[in-house]
Structure formats: structure tokens, C-alpha cells
Amino acid sequence: MSLVKTEGIVLKSFKYGDSSLIFSLYTRDFGKVKVLAKGIKRAKSRTAPPGTFSLVEVVFYKRERSELHLLSSAETLKSFSGLSKSLNRFSWAAAVSELLDQLIKGEESNPRIFNLSLKTLSRMELTDESNPEKLFWSFALKLSTHLGYKPKLDACINCGKEIKEEEVFFSPERGGVICKKCAKEDEYYLKLSRESYLIARKLLSLDINKADKFPVDKESLEEISELVKSFISYHTGAKELKTLEFLRKISG
Ligand SMILES: [Zn+2]
């Protein structure tokens, strides 16, 4: 057992007994870890329980043969309290943490994913009320890239030629767009308008701090969300996020 110190984003927490909590953290140095905070809910506890999404500096005892480590201390560096002030912001931030929790399998560090997640939450807290959804889909596209399955959107996956059609075919299975000439009749494709296709390319390539400023209409966002969902679920076996189901219900 060794004592380690790192920064982490609180993905979720759940009760353990009467006075303890288990935190699922996405950390800079150890990937996704679970830590047990003994007695943190007691009034006398020296550490206040950090809230969901907050960035914390944690010190914990890392156990070699266990997936549950022991928290020694946690100091909140950034609480992202602005995210809790609107249901819309809060829900899309929850979708970020749920997607990370689903796609990151274990204790493997990936500083690029850590920084992307942090930037996304920071931006979500500050951006206009209508933008968190756009940031989420841009985050999901970038996350797939960092996980090693970047969707190929720049040219046809078969012949490599530029896509010029008004209606663009995307194959979730093959992870990219395909031109009409190369498309096969018995293969499944998602269809996107040319506009949605060009926007998806932008959301994939733009820095996350600029993605929210890029104008996207509602129909395109809907098509892009279908593309990302089908692609991620094909490549990771991930189920639909509970947060997305919830967001759909509240938006009617
Ligand atoms: Zn082609």
C-alpha cells in the first residue's frame, strides 16, 4: 500500500454505511479510481465531502490488490458550483461524467482525456445557457479520438475522395463517412445533411473552448447526436446514457 497524491474529477459518489462515502474519481495520474472516504459524513470530519464534478486534490492509500483505495484527504480546488445553478448545465455536465465513467475502464492515466474533461466542465459552467449540449457532443467526439477510435470524417473511408454529396452516409461500423459510389446496398448507414456533416467535422477539430461559439441549428445537433451515439455504442458496447434519456424526457 502506498500513499499517493493526484488531482481528480469527482464522477459520482455513493453512501457506504452511515458515515462513509465511496467516490469514483477520474484522476490525472491513475485514470479512474474508487476511493473510500471513511467517516467523511461525520460532523467532526476534517474533510468536507466534495460535490460531483468538482476538481479535487486527493491523497489516498493505493492498495495493490484491490479496486477500492482509502482516501486520506481531499481538498476541493474548483467546485464548478455554477454547473448546479441550472438544470440544463447540470444535466449536460452529468452526461460528461457518465460518459467518462462508462468509457474509461480502469486505472490507466491519460492526461489528454483528463485535460479535455476539465476544459469541457469549465466551459460548460461559463457558456451561454443554450450551449452545453453542443459542448457535450464535441467532447464525445474528442473523447473517442483520445480513446483510439477517431471517427473518419474528412474523406470517404473506402476511396479516400472528398465527400461532395448533399446527403452524406456515415457507417457506425466502419467508423467514417462513405461516398455514394462506394456505398453498398446491404450495408447500414446513418444519413446526414451536408450541413450537419460539415458541423460534425468542426466539432471534432475545434478546440473545446471554441466549440460552443460555433453556430449549430437544432436539426444538425440532432443528426450529430445520432452519429456520435451510434458510433460510440458500436465501438464500445456502451448503453445509452441515463442522463440523455432524462434530458429527452424533460425537453418533451
Ligand atoms: Zn468512396
Image (spheres, grey):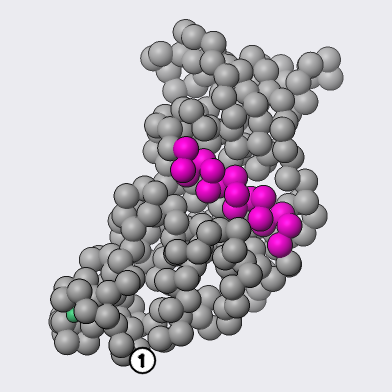
Q: How far from the left and from the top, in percent, is residue 194? A: 40, 86
Which residue corresponds to the image point at 36% horizontal and 91% vertical from the top-left? 166
**Residue found at the far bottom of this picture:** 166
Q: Secondary structure at mark 1?
A: loop
- Is residue 184 shown to the viewer in this render? yes
- Residue 158, by quadrant, is bottom left
Q: Which residue shows up at 50% across the image and 64% down it?
A: 206
Seen from the viewer's position, the closer of residues 221 and 201 is: 201
Image region (quadrant) for ligand 1: bottom left
Q: Horizontal and vertical percent for residue 95?
A: 57, 54
| Residue sitting at x 73%, y 45% | 80
Q: Nearer the viewer, residue 38 or 11?
A: 11
**Mark 1 Cα within 10 Å, few/some/many (few <14, many 20+)?**
few
Q: Which residue is mark 1?
A: 166
In the image, the segment drawn in magenta is 111-127
Q: Residue 176's quadrant in the figure? A: bottom left
Instruction: Reply yes or no: does residue 121 show up in magenta.
Output: yes
Kindly indicate the quadrant of the structure image that contains residue 141.
bottom left
Amino acid marked by disc 1? Glu
Query: Where does the image place residue 218, in percent across and percent down from the top left?
Result: 58, 81
211 vs 85, left or right, is left
Judged from this view, the residue extending furthest toward the right is 43
- The answer to whether residue 32 is above or below residue 145 is above
Q: Is residue 14 visible?
A: no
Give the answer, above or below, for where 208 lies relative to 146: below
Tell me the chief SS of the magenta region: helix
Image: 158 above or below 109: below
Residue appearing at x 31%, y 90% in the figure? 165
Q: Is residue 141 magenta?
A: no
